[in-house]
Amino acid sequence: MIETVLNNETAIRLGAFFGILIIMILWEAAAPRRTRSFSRWVRWPSNLGIVALNTVVVRLLFPAAAVGVAWIAGEKGWGLFQSFDVPMAVAIVASVVLLDFFIYLQHVLFHAVPGLWRLHRMHHADLDFDVTTGARFHPIEIVLSMIIKMGAIAALGAPPIAVIIFEVLLNATAMFNHANAKLPLGVDRVLRLILVTPDMHRVHHSVVVNETNSNFGFNLPWWDRLFGTYREQPAAGHEGMTIGIEQFRDGADLRLDKMLVQPFRADAGDYAITG
């Protein structure tokens, strides 16, 4: 089973990505949580265009990508789980959980340092919140994130199968928790105990600074609760809250060319935690 997964990594990841994307698009259409401020035709070409650009950049710069690092770590005996006789099942589960923790820490870091916030704020500058927002990241941030992730994988000695599981989960949950999809409040209340829900993560995309700097988790919600960065609801409510950041409120800023130069425009503002 594991060998089959490893041999079909690309097909599995692409299948999961497009499958979840289609499901979220249909869900958003059938039961939207908020009224859109902009047409999909205004936002989606740029948001999906940045996905295509980032895919090319990662493939060119990191042809082996994260799974390749896991293979090398296994061959060289690098990392925590390679240094000790850890059962494979334990190494897989622990790797997925710890990699999720590293992503949480990285996310906080990109909010804490003004220079990194300049890169990350392109994700927050989307003026609506839907499934495509979950993949809207600046190429430089994507490159830095991949380097950090590969370092974490090597340090852990994470098994390749764990990395594939983590990558699929990260992509799937990023699309899910950015979806403009309505969940019954009771279901949301229970589900967010084990998974970051759209209502939980939407708070993080509020224009209000102290709401932007909360709910950093993408997959597991425990880190926010554990480290005091959890905020249950936006002050204005989900229908009344304003999405985005103060610096980029013009519809023209949703264009791909404008998105790519955002890190070099305006100041870091009040959003960077240590700014």
Image (cartoon, rainbow, N blue to C red):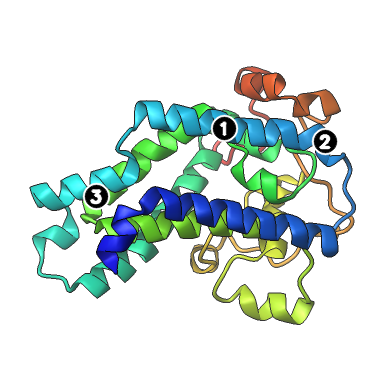
Q: Looking at the image, which residue is at 37% across and 52% down?
A: 9
Which of the two discs, 3 and 2, sits closer to the camera? 2
Residue on which the image places disc 1: 52
Nearest to the observer: residue 224 or residue 221: 221
Taking 126 as reference, is 187 above or below it?
below
Of the numbered discs 3 and 2, the one sitting upstream in the chain is 2
Q: Secondary structure at mark 3?
A: helix
- The answer to whether residue 241 shows anywhere in this view is yes
Residue on which the image places disc 2: 41
Q: Looking at the image, which residue is at 59% across and 28% down?
A: 118
Give the number of the disc on residue 70. Answer: 3
The percent coordinates of residue 234 (x first, y second) are: 77, 59
Which of the two discs, 1 and 3, sits closer to the camera? 1
Callout 3–callout 2 Cβ contact below 8 Å: no
From the viewer's perspective, tell me whether residue 83 is left or right of residue 106. Answer: left
The percent coordinates of residue 54 (x first, y second) are: 52, 31
Taking 39 as reference, is 238 above or below it?
below
Q: Give the residue type at disc 1.
A: Ala
Q: Quadrant of the N terminus?
A: bottom left
Nearest to the observer: residue 190 or residue 164: 164
Quarter of the image for residue 46 reads top right
Q: Looking at the image, which residue is at 37% across and 56% down?
A: 164
The percent coordinates of residue 109 (x first, y second) are: 47, 42
The percent coordinates of residue 182 (x first, y second) are: 79, 67
Q: Secondary structure at mark 1?
A: helix
- The answer to whether residue 101 shows anywhere in this view is no
Of the numbered discs 2 and 1, the one sitting upstream in the chain is 2
- How far apart are the alpha carbons under marks 2 and 1? 17 Å
Callout 2–callout 1 Cβ contact below 8 Å: no
